[in-house]
Amino acid sequence: MHRLMLTVGLSLLSLPLSAADWAQFKGPNAAGVSDEKGLPVEWGKDKGVKWKTALPARGVSCPVVVGNRVYVTCASGKRDDKLHVLAYDATTGKELWHRQLLATGPTSCHPMSSMAAPTPVADETGVYALFASGDVAAFDADGTLRWYRSLVGDYPTITNQVGMAASPVLVGDRLIVPMDNDGESFLAAVDTRYGKNVWKADRPKAINWVTPLVREAGGTTEVLFAGPGGMTAYDAATGKQRWVYKEAKGDIPTASIAGGFLYYPAGGVAAVKLGEKGAEEKPAMTARTARPGMASPLVYMGKVFTVDGQGFVTAADAKTGKQLYKERTKGAASASPVAGDGKVYVTSEKGVTTVLPADKETFEPLATNDLGEEVLGTPAISGGSLFIRTDKHLYRIGK
């Protein structure tokens, strides 16, 4: 009975999000797919831009959109120790509020990265921002600080010399915080009202940049988190380990759940069927030539799309793994491909977005759009638009 009450509680405390919301890394459950229609095809610095606004500092996190608010994080200072959380009006691009924190943990990272690498997660009440320094803060929708935690203060051995980037997710009234690193590693569920641990599951000491996934399995909400030992499923109510699939090992790209299958990086992309008790023993499909690089794989309209560090986009059949095409786009990509309205958007590090028709089995770009600025974070899709965060600006692309 106690377990049933916990599970029901998670469901009841989940605030409804609009179909147009893109509330976390790669949107709903990190799938990278939107139900939006009328999405843009062509744009540039001087066309197709609804608005753009200057950002106060650099960051590689992704924008998230809930209701009429766009949330972004940045980091500045010689040591990258000034942490910024901002909210913008999604209609006009007007800055609504800007809050700053000082990092309490180590700020060493790869030159391409930033303390503003993890993507924030939001709901109707506000936003939760995790930084690579181990600082996490919750603000309401109007910018009032609800709570703040220094995870390095709580767990002093947390360290990652190349920078952390795994992003938090929300499950009801719990913020799921991934903290795999070279020191004390764990996955924690934090109460969204007070910032206190509800449960904490210990993890092996290892650097890891993947974001957790969430699924329902036989009446239980599971949090799936990949690592060097494979994909581990935790009970979202208790933190108890439910199952492990050793083949789906984590590193940088985040896996995706689509059609009852888990699509995960494995020297390409493999798919395994998920049942109530976990993953089946053997993969149902392997697309060996679809190598995701740093960008996460995308599953959309019966195909798997990947983009690698040389800018090669590969499309493969999601059921058979058969390669449909492999073509080079305009430069390497760190941003993950996203999709909606029958279109796939692949954005390079140089800010060039190639728009592909998802229904084609040949490489036939609809447009190639250049913003001329660095883009490392994955775009968000909401309100018939793309929200693209560059190293200098936040853009809303659309009619």
Image (cartoon, helix red, strand yellow):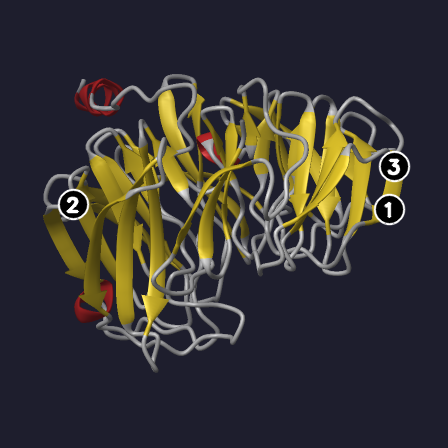
Q: Disc 1 to disc 3, how far (Cα)? A: 11 Å
Q: Residue 60 appears at what percent x and percent y?
A: 47, 59
Q: Which residue is found at the position 34% from the left and 82% from the top?
A: 78
Q: Do the residues labelled 3 and 2 touch (CB within 8 Å)?
A: no
Q: Residue 287 appears at what percent x and percent y?
A: 80, 40
Q: Which residue is found at the position 37% from the left and 65% from the top?
A: 57
Q: Which residue is found at the position 80% from the left and 42% from the top?
A: 314
The mark found on residue 327 in the picture is 1
Looking at the image, residue 28 sits to the left or right of residue 98; the answer is right
Q: Name the residue under label 3.
A: 323
**Amino acid tagged 1:** Glu
Q: Mark 2 points at which residue?
A: 143
Q: Disc 3 to disc 2, how far (Cα)? A: 47 Å
Looking at the image, residue 94 sits to the left or right of residue 165; the answer is left
User: Image quadrant of residue 294?
Assistant: bottom right
Q: Residue furthest front?
A: 46
| Number of numbered discs | 3
Judge the density around disc 3: few (<14), some (14-19), many (≥20) Cα neighbours within 10 Å. Answer: some
Judge the density around disc 2: few (<14), some (14-19), many (≥20) Cα neighbours within 10 Å. Answer: some
Looking at the image, residue 268 sits to the left or right of residue 136; the answer is right
SS for dot 2: loop
**Amino acid tagged 3:** Gln
Residue 65 vs 273, above or below: the answer is below
In which quadrant will I find the C terminus? top right
Q: Are marks 1 and 3 in contact (CB under 8 Å)?
A: no
Judge the density around disc 1: few (<14), some (14-19), many (≥20) Cα neighbours within 10 Å. Answer: few
- Counting residues from the N terminus, which is met first, the one under dot 2 or under dot 1? 2
